[in-house]
Image (tube, coloured by chain):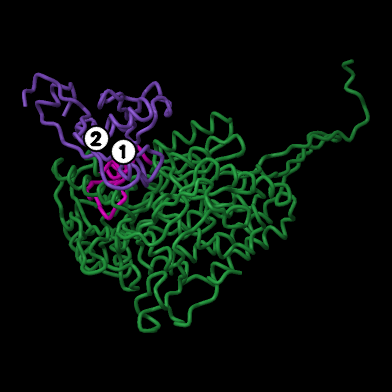
Amino acid sequence: MTDTLTKPTEESGREGGSATGVFIAPGRPGSLVSLKPRYENFIGGKWVAPVKGEYMKDISPVTGKAFCEVARSTKEDVELALDAAHRARQAWAETSLTDRAAVLNKIADVIEANLEMLAVAESWENGKPVRETLAADIPLAVDHFRYFAGATRSLEGRSTEIDKDTVAYHFHEPLGVVGQIIPFNFPLLMAAWKIAPALAAGNCTVVKPASPTPWSILKLAELLEDVVPAGVLNVITGPGAEIGKALATSPRIAKIGFTGETTTGRLIMQYAAENLIPSTVELGGKSPNIFFADVMNEDDEFLDKAIEGLVLYAFNKGEVCTCPSRALVAESIYDKFMERCLDRIKKITQGNPLDPSTMIGPQVSTQQLEKITSYVDIGLQEGAECLIGGQRVHLDGEFADGYYFAPTVLKGHNKMRVFQEEIFGPVLAVTTFKDEAEALEIANDTLYGLGAGVWTRDGNLAYRMGRAIQAGRVWTNCYHLYPAGAAFGGYKISGVGRENHQMMLEHYSQTKNLLVSYSTKPLGFF
Amino acid sequence: MDGSRAPERVVATPAALKAIEELVAERGPVMFFQSGGCCDGSLPLCFDQGEFVIGSRDVLLGTVAGCEFYIDHRQYEVWKHTQIILGVGDGEPEGFSLAAGRDQHFIITSRVFSDGELQALGIDN
């Protein structure tokens, strides 16, 4: 086990050694997170320098400053990772389900034992508030590995008696070596979503983290050096156009998994087509969050939950594929309901994400910040009304160059581009509807179909809406829950395939059919 | 603007034109495809010409510095009332796009067409 498991002397890892204060940034005295100036690729269980010796800076959006370097890999490094994965492939495929599940459970245990360390690392690199990484990202990653440890053991092959003497046996067999490309918005959790089922199904994987967030996955790899057999899990960092392409076009992978945007989704499928291999792509959405009038029938805990449900657009600063970024509010309650919601939005505290009281941190990069700014601009040009926020926020001191954007609400109509495209920032587009039919029409008037939310006290209405909305996940009287065991994936152009469920094991397995005759009689043809 | 002449659907800033010319000089012709969806969605992706296979329903919005700029036909339907302005920003591209020169990436801003421009483009407002 590496020294990262050894906690520093300042036990709490927080300023002043308190039990509740601000976490100390990685690499600084007393931090829970050790930091090296430079990180190499994790290949075959070892740290391997990039063949061409080049590195790139990793910037923390919290300060806008580089905090370490990671390998700027090239296609030669992709080949090294594939070599290692192929060396490990047969032994891992032949590892018993008992032992494979034990490895997954050990991964979960190690993450859990280092929960605060990984939560701080993830927060510093991505900008997400530590209150979210402590309570959601990291615990969910832990549970995900445990879920697939159990899921793979409970997944049974099937047999069919074709006739009295003929039996069709169906076995799950690993695909072999797979490639997996991770997005920047939940670096560790999305890595867990991809790695856990791939390994559980007996595959070896080569993982490429997103360019803005390569480091937290390397911190995880440090913890797994002696946990996962060498070559079963490999992590290489570098530009998508170089190593993402080299990985996705390689004839040495049996499948490619990707989460990102639509054009690269098409490109990934195009690359997979070149080699006639399967792909799973998750490409985002523009998820409607629908509030029917009866949510305001009482001023109670449920109404409070519904108000929080609208404000969840600011969760992870809006950098969520299923961000509830289109709020559809019943016309009859619009004024009163939005007043309550805007009051709640005003109370969002923005700042250093390592402060446990911070609710919203910085956007992940300047590119995301530029995009959000350009969308607010186009929204205003289209005639949207800005109800709150709408601009970049400049904080003081160390955070002055961080990428902060104020929680924003734009009121408009569904044909505006701010209602049609995922902004991937803390920007809510809100509009009204008259009745159930119009709510459904607006909800489905989108190219995407990943998530949706329905809020009502009427169970029948909730069921009708849930079934009629063209989206892979409809949260009913809740939002942004991601438990393992609930299938996640898109309708329409939001992607192909499902994650987060035992069915994922099928996506990472071959089906072997043995068709066996127990009869001695010839067919009689020849 | 005079409503009789259709405006360009995509234009480029001087910095973007310069970046494209340098890219073309270095690696040969390039192409652009406007993305949508999550993460790097809404960013323009730049590829070597032919790297991205254009489908029969993709819409050619125009050319910038002689390079073709496409968008998905469904996305075109919800974007067609706006002009795309290709520019350049600081920092390496985050996804599969080629860089717009060293430590630079392509970005877009948008402008809503006037009624006259929409009429000239034959787009119902």
Sequence-earlier tag: 1 or 2: 2
Q: Residue at 6% of width from left, 23% of height from top? A: B2
Most extreme residue toward the top is A526
Amino acid at dot 1? Ala
Q: Position of residue A473 (x, y in %)?
A: 43, 49
Along the viewing direction, whichever of B49 and A197 lies nearer the viewer: B49
Amino acid at dot 2? Ala
- Quarter of the image with the C terminus of chain A is top right
Chain identifier of the purple chain: B
Instruction: Identify the element where label 2 is drawn.
Output: helix
Residue that numbered label 2 is attached to: B16
Residue that numbered label 1 is attached to: B100
Q: Which residues are magenta?
A: A419-448
Quarter of the view holding residue A20: bottom left
Answer whether labels 1 and 2 touch (C-beta < 8 Å): yes
Along the viewing direction, whichever of A455 and A283 lies nearer the viewer: A283
Whole-angstrom CA distance, mark 1 to mark 2, is: 8 Å
Q: Colour of chain A?
A: green
Q: Position of residue A458 (x, y in %)?
A: 35, 56
Along the viewing direction, whichever of B51 and A500 lies nearer the viewer: B51
Label 2: how many residues lie within 10 Å, few (<14), some (14-19) or many (20+)?
many
Q: Is residue A421 magenta?
A: yes
